[in-house]
Amino acid sequence: MTRVLVIGAAGNTGRPIAAGLTAEGFTVRTATRDARPPVAAAEHVRFDWTDPSTHGAALEGVDRMYVLAPGLVEDPSAVMIPVLERALSGGVRRVVLLSASAVPEGGPGLGQVHAFLRKHAPEWSVLQPSWFMQNFISPVHHHHAGLQRDGTLVTATGQGRVGFVDAEDIAAVGVRALADDVSHDTAHVITGPQSLSYDDVAAILSRVSGRPIRHVQATPEEAQRHLQASGMPEIYARFLTMLDVRIRDGAEDRVTDTVLRVTGRAPRDFESFARAHLGIRR
């Protein structure tokens, strides 16, 4: 029986991936920093990328694994690659990595993990989603905080557009990358069905919630100060602002057919997502 390790199984993609694999009959081992299992699964372990004492129990007897980076770490490759080397030498054959559309193979951080998997993993896939729709409803995300506080989205994206994607659609691609008999051995750029500006997002959220929602078009300096004022570390605020500038310059203005091609169903559009969640209604 194939055993799949799902790291980050309490998250937006890990939880539905663990549930989807379980439904398909795989033996799933969930791994989080919490000792309590996040989903109904036969196995669960506590796992922390930075704590080697948690790695052995997580990797033992694993054939395939889903991995994502630890949060707020400037260079996740430094902690991820040694664990992946141990996993591959211990018998893991297939690795599916959650990266991002903004991170090229071979680039810093997750780009290095991407390159490592292509070179060393017998079977591999890299999920490169665009920005998550969940950013607007997650209590831990700065966009949700602004919406709740005063109905604003503050970015330096200008009129740049993004193919926002539902995490459930990302997870559906991840399930297929892990479950299919033939490994995908590719990078999947994953978007929703529309490319939207933050002005478009604000208009949709206003219509769905019945509240006035406004996109504040800030300069990069203003956007970074806004993020730091919310308590975000300077280095991460600077990184997110850099990504805003890339959006402004057109880097995320694309739509792919990945979800439909890999899963056989169309991805969810943003207005349908907003109506399903209504995370900003008060």
Image (cartoon, grey):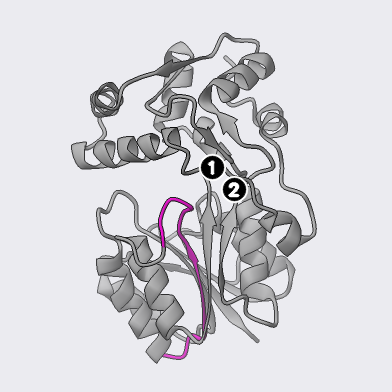
Which residue has dot 2 on it?
A: 167
- Where, quadrant-wise, is the N terminus in this rendering? bottom right
Residue at point 37% right, 69% down? Answer: 113
Q: Position of residue 255 (x, y in %)?
A: 63, 46
CA neighbours of label 1 inside 10 A, class few (<14), some (14 to 19), many (20+): some
Q: Secondary structure at mark 1?
A: loop
Which residue is more in the foreground, 75 or 27?
A: 75
Residue at point 32% right, 69% down? Answer: 80
Which residue has dot 1 on it?
A: 132
- Where, quadrant-wise, is the C terminus in this rendering? top right
Disc 2 vs disc 1: Cβ atoms closer than 8 Å? yes
Compared to 248, does 252 lie above or below? below
* Farthest residue, direction left: 234
Residue at point 61% right, 48% down? Answer: 191
In screen coordinates, is 91 left or right of 181?
Answer: left
Question: From this viewpoint, is residue 110 visible?
Answer: yes
Q: Amino acid at mark 1?
A: Phe
Question: From this viewpoint, is residue 19 visible?
Answer: no
Q: Position of residue 41 (x, y in %)?
A: 60, 66
Q: Which residues are magenta?
A: 90-104
- Snapshot quadrant of residue 16: bottom right
Separation of residues labelled 2 and 1 (CA atoms): 6 Å
Q: Amino acid at mark 2?
A: Ala
Q: Position of residue 159 (x, y in %)?
A: 49, 25
- Snapshot quadrant of residue 143: top left
